[in-house]
Amino acid sequence: MAAPVQLIGEGDYVVLKREDVFKAVQVQRRKKVIFEKQWIYLDNAIGKNYGTMFEITGGGNLQMKSNIVASAEPKEAGADNRNIVDDGKSQKLTREDIEALKEKGIKGQEIVQQLIENSTTFRDKTEFAQEKYIKKKKKKYEANITILKPSTRILAVMYYAREPGKICQLRYDTLAQMLTLGNIHAGSKVLVMETCAGLVLGSVMERMGGYGSVIQMYSGGGPVRAATDCFGFPKSFYETLYEFPLNKLEALISGTGSYSSRVIPAEEEPEKMDEESSRSDNEKQKATQDLVGDCLTESTESMKTSLAESEEGVKRCEEVSENHKGGQNVDKKQVAMEKKQKQDERRKREAEAAKLLQDRNADGLIVASRFHPTPLLLTLLEFVAPSRPFVVYCQYKEPLLECYTKLRERGGVINLKLSETWLRNYQVLPDRSHPKLVMSSGGGYILHGITVTRDTTKTNTSCSERTEEPAPKKQKVAEDKS
């Protein structure tokens, strides 16, 4: 049975693609989106299939690009490019001529054709050089974009090209290895500690497909999930996502205190809310008094002309001030209720995450953080069940070497390996396949292994059984000379 075709809907997260440039945006009607220094509207993309190519028309609107391919005319090409001199005089069309063509509404494909016709050296170039010239001009003058459905590969490529520092220089091939070595699959319980804008978390959630549970460990005031939101997961996926702060792990490990009441100090919140509400009440009451005072001043001045009009003005001002005060009180109560509801929901979710951690039977652990990995890994391994994989990523080798040594001393792990990921892109074209000249120098380092049960009852009996005297040397057998 074929999978249902997914269409672009309002409110969905999509990825805009133009050549090798990507950008994740949310589809909203009549909202300007800037992409490659150009404003566009995504209204016409709603209801279309993912992967559709659009052409940007006047006013920033999108129009579906036809798939009709122009008939190929016989090309006239030269043998080599040795006689071609780039002196800037080979193109007859000037900058003003091209701008005039754009103002007339001529599309990019026609502009490229005119550039070819007005080039004095185009026919002298080789066939490969002609294709390169056409591709370059199309990229500059043809405003075509493709709308794609977000995925781990697309978002990893986008972040690595645009903002690699936000994802700790995590390359997409390295991320793929982490998901494979961590044995991420549906129905598992996975611990994730990352500071990669939520990219690793979203990749884990995508591979699990909404089945199982993911516990995100975070530092600071709350988790960062900018990249996770770009995946556009349904609400059912977030029901399997839990969060837990790192600064409360020690209390959870030691079992001190009632953790469900320590998630959010509920005793402090009502006091803060009361102080804020009383302070806001005084400010709003003062503002209301000022408003009434102004109205009374105006009415007093108008008493000289008409006493009736002043009385009506005072009544009208009082009614406005009462309505204004009543509306502010309603808004204040509504905000306080929403805030309390969010706090209760957060307290409940953290209590559920604490319960999942207390079972200490997680099926995997993934760490990709800008913090030093050794204390994180040694603490989080306490919540991983035996015979389960763990993966640690770092863009530098030295922190993982220290982590490797600490794990060897601690024990409880096997198949411990530290590896460097490396990727080389190739251009594959007829008669010109070769490695690309521009490539990344490195993809970071990965430390991975498998947990086992530690034998804490091991004693140094073997050392105590040894005698202090050295073992006697073997005596040589005398040879019989007879």
Image (cartoon, rainbow, N blue to C red):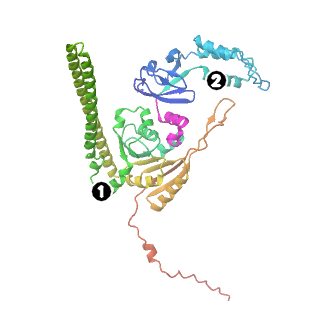
Front position in the image: 31 or 15: 31
Q: Which mark is residue 135?
A: 2
Q: Residue at x 47, y 77 (%)?
A: 466
Front position in the image: 62 or 478: 62
- Depicted 401 relative to depicted 319: above or below: below
| Label 2: which secondary element | helix
Secondary structure, magenta segment, majority class = helix
Residue 42 screen position, x and y as percent? 46, 21
State the residue position of label 1. 256
Residue 451, by quadrant, is bottom left
Q: Quadrant of the C terminus?
A: bottom right
Residue 10 screen position, x and y as percent? 40, 23
| Label 1: which secondary element | loop
Q: Which range is magenta?
A: 149-170
Residue 112 screen position, x and y as percent? 64, 17
- The amino acid pointed to by label 2 is Lys
